[in-house]
Amino acid sequence: MSDAASPTSQGAEQAPTPAAPQPPVFQPMPLPRALGYMSASIVIALTQGMAQGFVSTNIPQIAGDLGATTTQASWLMAAFLIPRASMPLLLIKLRAQYGLRRFAEVAIVIYVVVALLSFAALDLRSAITTQFFAGMASAPLSTLAFLYALEPLPPAWKMRLGLPVSLSMIAVGPHLARVISPALMNDQGWGALHLMTLGMAGISLALVYLLPLKSPPRVKAIAPLDLVSWLLIACGFGGLITGFVMGPTLWWTEAPWLGKVVAASVVCLTLAVVIELHRKAPLLDIRWLASPAMLHLTVTLLVFRLILSEQSAGAPRMFQMLSITQSQLVPLFAVISVATVLGGLALIPWLKPERVPVIHLIALVLIAAGAFLDSRSTLDTRPVQMMFSQGLIAFAGSLFMAPAMMRGLMAALARGPNYLLSFVIVFLSTQSIGGAAGSGMFTTFINHGQALHLQVLREELMTVDPLVARELAARVAQLAPQIADPAQSRAQAAALIAQEASNLAYVLAYNDAYFLTFLAAIAAASALVLHMGRDWLAAHWPRGRNPSPSAESLQ
């Protein structure tokens, strides 16, 4: 007994070395259950995407329901985006510490509760508060959609099939919101949007409980300094999003507090970086994020997100300025939705790590082609004339995002699971902040360009131009049967011409922005071609004779 209880040193030496833990063997799911998990991924992705799209699409109508101005209602979008930018960073830690299954169940219950609370938003202040919690509650849904798409797939197909499907479904949600929201708003106003969101949240709740996710072993993942760093990052991201969302609306130089908010955001992010650099077990590995490979990926994601702002902040707002109603835009966004899904599906046969540069090059060329076609818009341009170009851009968006995320995930997992969190913050910052920054910069460019074009047009109208005089006389003749007073008819005709000049100035500004997008896509494609050429030369350039032993020793 005593000998058995206390092994000798000889026995200890002969004890076999414990084998390294093997990864769990994949157990194939029955096809109906696997389809159920993929369906759950699609429903959850659409639930969070459409919730965001319902707000951004219907800001003017929602402002009317709340008795607020459109400028005031813009805070709804900022309130929704602020928590979404930083919450997933904390949620990854919570998921690791408390278990994936509990995380999924609690997250979807919270989302349903917030959807119910949305019915109590009767004024602007309560609506902004509700939207803040809605953005916070929807943050886990993107992760859940991604995890449900990966759950039934074998390892070889997780990146090749699960990643494109989940990302394309997340991307198509805001576009589908524009397709269905006009019919909902016409019936019951903003309450119908709440009802639709609640219904989809209820379906997602049922799917999460019927189809539980497998939970990996729990680990203690949250340290006190993690919360400090996360709070600083959240404040930094929130301030940047506030600046980019509200800056073009309130105008940068007219609201000095915007500069203070952005400056405070930079200070918060700087403090977070300083704290993380001095930690033994950091929340984010700043040194890895500053490596050339990760900086290249970050710049790629950010540039692409800025270029894609042409679709979210371009055509819809231009048509709104041209008095095109939301219901008239439904066919355009139906085409965009289909193209977004097709872009994700087109990746499935071709998505491999070595093909990522070629796929990105194709995406940039398609975006450049779509933006160039859009840059030829006129006052007579209608949604049907932009279906092809906007479809190209939507297709390219799905074509680009999944390979970029796959490259980042593979780089993170190759160094260890702890690096996954660092990549997630890169992806989130480029998508959330990049999206808000791109939209804000695009709108600022449009407003500035419209003012310049309008000034030139007004100068032309004020000159004694025979064409202007002929157009004014024709308008006076058209108004003569309606307005008896010649002076009033002439003033009315001049006002109509001035309004058309204002609309034309906007169209010219949008054309400039579209052409700038075209140039940016061409520049990015050219840089990618040079990078691919350098890699090809490095792989195929003859290396000459083998170095001498002395040279090897020096190396």
Image: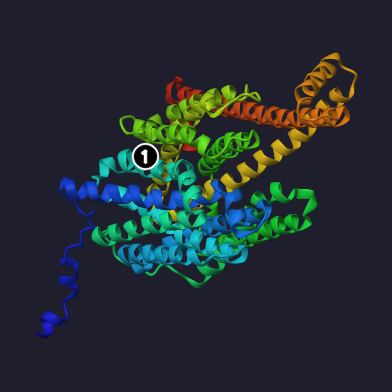
Q: Quadrant of residue 201?
A: bottom left
The front one of 434 and 515 is 515
Residue 405 appears left or right of 292: left
Residue 272, given in percent of the width and then of the height, sits at 60, 61
Name the residue beneath numbered marker 1.
Answer: 164
- Looking at the image, which residue is at 44% across and 44% down? 180
Q: Is residue 245 above or below residue 276?
A: above
Kind of residue indicated by mark 1? Pro
Residue 54 appears left or right of 235: left
- Looking at the image, which residue is at 27% across and 62% down? 209
- Looking at the image, which residue is at 57% across and 60% down? 277
Residue 524, given in percent of the width and then of the height, sits at 57, 29
- Looking at the image, which residue is at 78% across and 23% down? 475
Q: Is residue 183 above or below residue 374?
A: below
> Crowding at label 1, few (<14), some or many (≥20) Cα neighbours within 10 Å?
many
The front one of 496 and 374 is 496
Residue 531 seen from this side: no
Q: Residue furthest bottom?
A: 2
Q: Residue furthest top?
A: 466
